[in-house]
Image (spheres, helix red, strand yellow):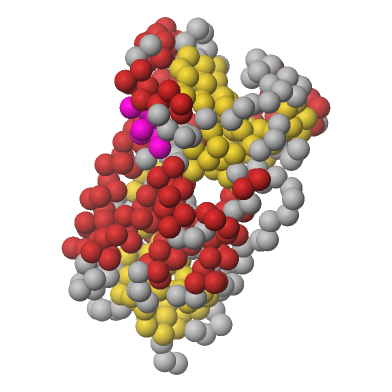
C-alpha cells in the first residue's frame, strides 16, 4: 500500500498534541494527528479535570483560534492567590498589585479539548486519523513509517510523542525515563460554596498535605487535595456530606458550607524525568516529556510551552528536514531550563512541606516573601509565563 507522506506526525490529540498540530498546520507544514478515540462532547456537568492556564498560554490558544470557542461563562479568571503554611506563614499574590489583569484562567479540560478539536476540524490543515490505533512503527533512514490498524500507512520526517506519561513513542524511541513516586495521590472534586470566592485561589500546606481550591464560575470551586495514598482512598470512600465537611474543615471554613457537585476521584502523584526529549526523527512534548507535582498547577502550561517552542523551532528551520537532530536539539535546549526549573521547584517544595522539622523555616520563608513586593511580583511573572 502506498504511504501518505508528512513532515510531522503527532501521536496523541490531548490538549498539547492538538495545539501543536493546529499550530504547525497553520504554519503550512504537512501534518497528521493520530489519536485512539474521539474527544467527548462536553455536557453541563462540571469537569473535575481543571487547569489554570497562564496568560502566556491563553494568548497562544487565542492565536490558534481555540480560546475564542470556549464558553466565557465556564471560564474563571484568578485575581488573587492566598497560600497558607501550617503555622502563621502565608503569601498573597494579587493581580492588581502586580499590574496585570489576572494571574491565570481556570478552564475545564474537556471543554478546552473540544474547542481545540473544533478548531482543528474547521481549519482543515491537519490530516486527522481518529479514532485510529497504531499497529506498527518502523524507522527508516529518512522517514518513520507508521501503519495504522485499519491499514493506512503514514510516513513522516518527524514523529512527535504527545501521548502522555506512559508514552508509547518514548518507549519505542528508547528515550529512557525515571519515575519517582511521591507515595501520594491527588483527590479531585468540585463543590458549590456558600460564600463568594471573588476569583481567589486558595492553597494550604499542612500535615504533609497540600490542599488547593481553584475558583470556578459562580459560587463553585474545584479541589485538589494531595495526600498520602491511604488517606486519599479514605476521602474518596466518604459520602458526599462527609467529604464536604472534611474539605470545609481543612480549608478553615473560608467559603462557608460546601456541597459536592461531582464525585471525588484520585490519581497517583509522581515525578517523571526523561533523559532526553529528542533523537533523530523523534521529539516528545507534554507529559511524555516530563511530569511535575500538581502543587504548582503548571503541568499543562509546560506542555503548551513545549508545543509553542517546537513549532517555532521547526518554522525557523523550514529549509531543514523536520527530523534533523540539529533542529530538534535546538528545541530541546530551549525547553530544558524551564522544565528543570519547574521540576526542581515543585520537587523541592514537596519535600520542604512534607518534613515536619522544616516547619519554622518554611513558615518564616513565606512571611518574608509576603513582605517583599518585588519578590512577589517576580513570582507572579514566573506563574504567568
Q: Is residue 126 above or below residue 377?
A: below
Q: Is residue 297 above or below residue 172?
A: above
Query: Residue 178's spot in the image, x, y percent?
Result: 37, 45
Query: Residue 24's spot in the image, x, y percent?
Result: 38, 67
Q: Is residue 105 magenta?
A: no
Residue under the image location 47 percent in, 10 percent down: 89
Residue under the image location 38 percent in, 11 percent down: 371
Query: Which residues fall within the magenta stretch?
Result: 378-384
Look at the magenta stretch and give its main secondary structure. helix
Q: Is residue 173 above or below residue 180?
A: below
Residue under the image location 78 percent in, 30 percent down: 259
Does residue 88 appear left or right of residue 31 in this picture? Answer: right
Where residue 233 sits, quadrant-wise, is: top right
Residue under the image location 37 percent in, 40 percent down: 385
Q: Outermost residue toward the bottom?
A: 1
Q: Nearer the viewer, residue 287 or 367?
A: 367
Q: Quadrant of the N terminus?
A: bottom left
Amino acid at each position: 500500500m502506498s504511504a501518505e507522506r508528512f513532515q510531522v506526525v503527532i501521536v496523541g490529540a490531548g490538549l498539547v498534541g492538538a495545539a501543536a498540530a493546529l499550530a504547525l498546520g497553520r504554519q503550512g507544514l504537512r501534518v497528521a494527528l493520530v489519536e485512539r478515540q474521539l474527544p467527548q462532547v462536553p455536557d453541563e456537568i462540571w469537569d473535575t479535570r481543571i487547569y489554570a492556564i497562564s496568560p502566556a498560554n491563553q494568548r497562544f490558544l487565542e492565536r490558534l483560534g481555540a480560546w475564542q470557542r470556549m464558553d466565557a461563562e465556564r471560564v474563571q479568571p484568578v485575581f488573587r492567590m492566598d497560600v497558607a503554611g501550617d503555622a502563621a506563614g502565608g503569601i498573597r499574590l494579587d493581580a492588581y498589585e502586580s499590574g496585570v489583569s489576572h494571574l491565570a484562567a481556570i478552564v475545564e479540560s474537556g471543554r478546552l479539548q473540544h474547542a481545540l478539536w473544533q478548531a482543528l476540524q474547521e481549519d482543515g490543515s491537519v490530516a486527522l486519523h481518529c479514532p485510529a490505533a497504531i499497529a506498527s512503527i518502523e524507522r527508516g533512514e529518512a522517514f518513520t513509517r507508521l501503519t495504522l490498524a485499519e491499514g493506512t500507512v503514514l510516513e513522516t520526517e518527524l514523529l512527535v510523542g504527545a501521548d502522555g506519561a506512559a508514552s508509547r513513542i518514548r518507549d519505542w524511541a528508547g528515550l529512557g525515563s525515571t519515575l519517582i513516586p511521591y507515595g501520594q495521590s491527588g483527590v479531585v472534586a468540585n463543590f458549590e460554596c456558600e460564600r463568594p470566592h471573588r476569583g481567589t485561589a486558595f492553597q494550604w500546606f499542612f500535615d504533609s498535605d497540600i490542599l488547593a481550591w481553584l475558583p470556578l464560575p459562580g459560587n463553585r470551586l474545584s479541589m485538589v487535595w494531595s495526600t498520602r495514598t491511604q488517606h486519599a482512598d479514605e476521602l474518596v470512600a466518604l459520602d458526599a456530606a462527609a467529604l464536604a465537611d472534611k474539605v470545609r474543615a481543612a480549608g478553615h471554613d473560608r467559603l462557608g458550607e460546601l456541597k459536592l457537585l461531582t464525585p471525588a476521584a484520585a490519581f497517583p502523584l509522581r515525578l517523571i524525568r526523561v533523559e532526553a526529549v529528542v533523537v533523530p526523527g523523534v521529539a516528545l512534548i507534554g507529559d511524555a516529556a516530563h511530569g511535575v507535582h500538581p502543587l504548582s498547577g503548571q503541568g499543562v502550561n509546560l506542555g503548551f510551552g513545549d508545543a509553542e517552542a517546537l513549532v517555532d523551532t521547526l518554522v525557523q528551520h523550514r529549509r531543514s528536514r523536520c527530523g534533523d537532530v540539529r533542529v530538534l536539539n535546538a528545541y530541546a535546549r530551549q525547553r530544558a531550563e524551564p522544565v528543570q526549573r519547574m521540576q526542581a521547584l515543585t520537587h523541592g517544595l514537596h519535600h520542604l512541606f512534607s518534613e515536619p522539622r522544616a516547619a519554622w523555616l518554611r513558615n518564616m520563608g513565606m512571611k518574608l516573601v509576603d513582605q517583599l513586593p518585588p519578590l512577589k511580583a517576580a513570582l507572579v511573572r514566573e506563574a504567568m509565563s
